[in-house]
């Protein structure tokens, strides 16, 4: 038994998660209501007659509104953290090292990356705790989205990507927020493209590979998908070109979104550790790789079921909660499997590989790599109006505005 | 003065909101501190909760200041010919 000794009252943690989620929701409502004060007709009517007071009031109000609008996100992060730990504990009670009856867990299963917290919580408690549904709702509402922008970054020299193993080793070399596009000339002379997408970034910062963005991605078109499409345009991928997409985790979700969006002929998609059961990929053939000890593919609450367009390769029998992070990791969970005879012999895998020769056996051109970003976030209208009011009032302020005494 | 009264109403609303934010924040901060966390992630959560409480207190102060200024604006309107 290794790891630190941890003593946590599961009921207290779960209750705290519910309270923090409720606090987040209430702060969100307060922030929205407070924004409306700034544009209240009485305030607007008073502005010309008491410009200094109104300007000062709005100057105080604006940072308060901004702060209040940010607090729900902070509380939500906390509540997901707390609820996730409760979920881990609940799962660990069934499968991991728990001293029965003592309420003491030895060998802490705190290995799950922060990145998956926002999503894992719904996997752990989705059927048990309505607070979690609230968390998801708040996350969805309060993760803002920009338009999705790209900038090119240097790409390492290309190599022949001849196998699924090669594809994912290359995906593993992508840094946070990066996507890579490689043209491949097939034996028929046609240029097709390989697009590689990595998983999300382990933080709640406002970039694209984040838990919040993953929640957005799970709902459909999103800034991440738009940014990848923009990267493909920057890479010179012409409309209607044939594509193969390979993604890990959130990258797999985005690959499915791209395939469903149209505009390109996505012929093949391969995902690793991605919750895609509720996605449809047009006419693309999809191969889903799922480690049985990886919770992430289950986050959509549905089982990926093989059919004529979807092949599923499941592997791994270790369901210990303490190994979830390792099982979800590309290098630790998925790449080892891709080199095994069992993977190569899987009829589903072999079936998916049929027709991939133009990509995997073609002549690759130089890869191009792009860093994706959300781009500028839209500002709430009420905040913009309040700022304009403040600016307008300041111009009329006899103490500080133009023409003021002593100025 | 209709608009002065409306301003006073808004000021009261902002002040009540500030009090609510304060109460909500203090309550959550106390609750977070009550839970026994003996793992790094838990300690981070408690620390973050404290930071959020600090930010919320500052926001509540801003709301009170805004309420005060709106009240003063209402007063000015009362005395504007």
Image (tube, coloured by chain):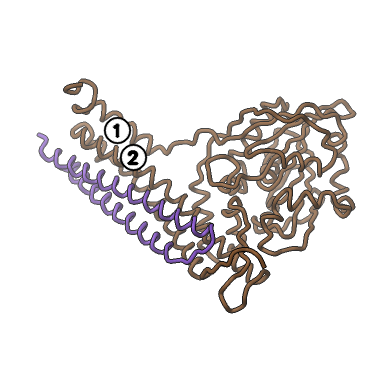
Q: In the image, residue A310 lies at what x, y percent? A: 79, 50
Question: In the rendered image of this protein, which colour is used for chain A?
Answer: brown
Give the residue drawn at x 20%, y 41%: B3
Query: Answer yes or no: do the residues labelled 2 and 1 have beta carbons within 8 Å?
Result: yes
Q: Which of B54 and B28 is in front in this view?
A: B54
The picture quadrant where one finds residue A51 is top left
Q: Where is residue A370 in the image (x, y as percent from the top left)?
A: 66, 31
Q: Is residue A182 above or below residue A290?
A: above
Give the tally of numbered discs. Answer: 2
User: Which residue is pictured at 78% across the width and 29% down the height?
Assistant: A183
Asked if both marks, 2 and 1, belong to the same chain, the answer given is yes
- Chain B: what color? purple
Relative depth, front residue between A59 and B33: B33
User: Is residue A139 left or right of A401 when viewed as pictured?
Assistant: right
Residue A92 sits above or below residue B54 on the image? below
Percent of width and height locating residue A243: 77, 35
Residue A62 is marked as: 2
Q: Tell me which corner region of the image, top left, top right, bottom left or bottom right, holds residue B71.
A: top left
The first of marks 2 and 1 along the sequence is 2
Q: Nearer the viewer, residue A166 or A1?
A: A1
Instruction: Please determine whether, in this image, residue A279 is positioned above or below residue B33.
Output: above
* Number of the label disc, if any, that sits on residue A390: 1
Work out whether A221 lies above or below A297. Answer: above
* Horizontal side, residue A35 vs residue A280: left or right: left
Disc 2: host chain = A
Which residue is depicted at the point 80% across and 51% down? A336
Q: How crowded is mark 2: few (under 14 residues within 10 Å), some or many (20 or more)?
A: many
* Helix, strand or loop at mark 2: helix
Q: Looking at the rendering, in which quadrant would you find the C terminus of chain A? A: top left
Chain where mark 1 sits: A
């Amino acid at each position: 038994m290794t790891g630190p000794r941890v003593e946590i009252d599961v009921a207290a943690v779960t209750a705290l998660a519910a309270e923090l989620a409720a606090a987040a929701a209430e702060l969100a409502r307060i922030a929205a209501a407070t924004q409306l004060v700034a544009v209240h007709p009485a305030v607007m009517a008073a502005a010309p007659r008491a410009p200094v007071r109104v300007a000062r009031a709005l100057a105080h109000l604006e940072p308060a509104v901004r702060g209040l609008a940010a607090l729900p996100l902070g509380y939500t992060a906390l509540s997901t953290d707390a609820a996730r730990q409760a979920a881990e504990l609940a799962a660990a009670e069934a499968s991991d090292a728990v001293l029965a009856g003592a309420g003491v867990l030895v060998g802490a299963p705190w290995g799950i990356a922060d990145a998956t917290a926002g999503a894992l919580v719904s996997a752990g408690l989705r059927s048990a705790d309505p607070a979690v549904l609230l968390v998801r709702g708040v996350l969805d509402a309060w993760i803002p989205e920009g338009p999705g922008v790209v900038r090119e970054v240097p790409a390492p020299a290309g190599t022949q990507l001849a196998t699924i193993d090669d594809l994912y080793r290359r995906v593993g070399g992508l840094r946070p927020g990066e996507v890579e596009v490689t043209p491949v000339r097939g034996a028929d002379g046609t240029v097709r493209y390989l697009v590689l997408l990595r998983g999300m970034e382990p933080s709640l910062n406002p970039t694209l590979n984040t838990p919040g963005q993953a929640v957005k991605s799970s709902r459909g078109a999103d800034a991440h998908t738009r940014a990848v499409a923009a990267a493909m345009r920057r890479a010179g991928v012409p409309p209607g070109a044939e594509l193969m997409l390979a993604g890990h985790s959130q990258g797999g979700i985005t690959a499915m979104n791209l395939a469903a969006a149209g505009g390109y002929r996505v012929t093949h998609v391969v995902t690793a550790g991605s919750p895609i059961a509720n996605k449809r990929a047009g006419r693309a053939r999809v191969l889903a790789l799922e480690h049985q000890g990886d919770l992430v593919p289950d986050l959509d609450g549905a089982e990926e079921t093989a059919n004529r367009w979807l092949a599923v390769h499941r592997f791994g029998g270790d369901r210990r909660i303490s190994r979830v992070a390792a099982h979800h990791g590309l290098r630790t969970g998925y790449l080892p499997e891709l080199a095994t005879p069992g993977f190569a012999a899987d009829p589903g895998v072999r079936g998916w590989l049929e027709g991939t020769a133009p990509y995997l056996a073609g002549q690759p051109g130089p890869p191009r790599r792009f860093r994706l970003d959300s781009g500028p976030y839209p500002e709430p209208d009420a905040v913009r109006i309040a700022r304009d009011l403040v600016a307008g009032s300041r111009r009329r302020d006899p103490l500080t505005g133009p023409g003021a005494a002593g100025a | 003065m209709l608009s002065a009264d409306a301003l006073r109403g808004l000021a009261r609303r902002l002040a009540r909101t500030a009090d609510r934010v304060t109460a909500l924040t203090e309550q959550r901060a106390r609750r977070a501190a009550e839970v026994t966390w003996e793992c790094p992630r838990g300690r981070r959560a408690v620390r973050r909760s404290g930071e959020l409480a600090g930010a919320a207190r500052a926001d509540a102060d801003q709301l009170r200041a805004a309420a005060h200024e709106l009240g003063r604006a209402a007063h000015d309107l009362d005395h504007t010919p």
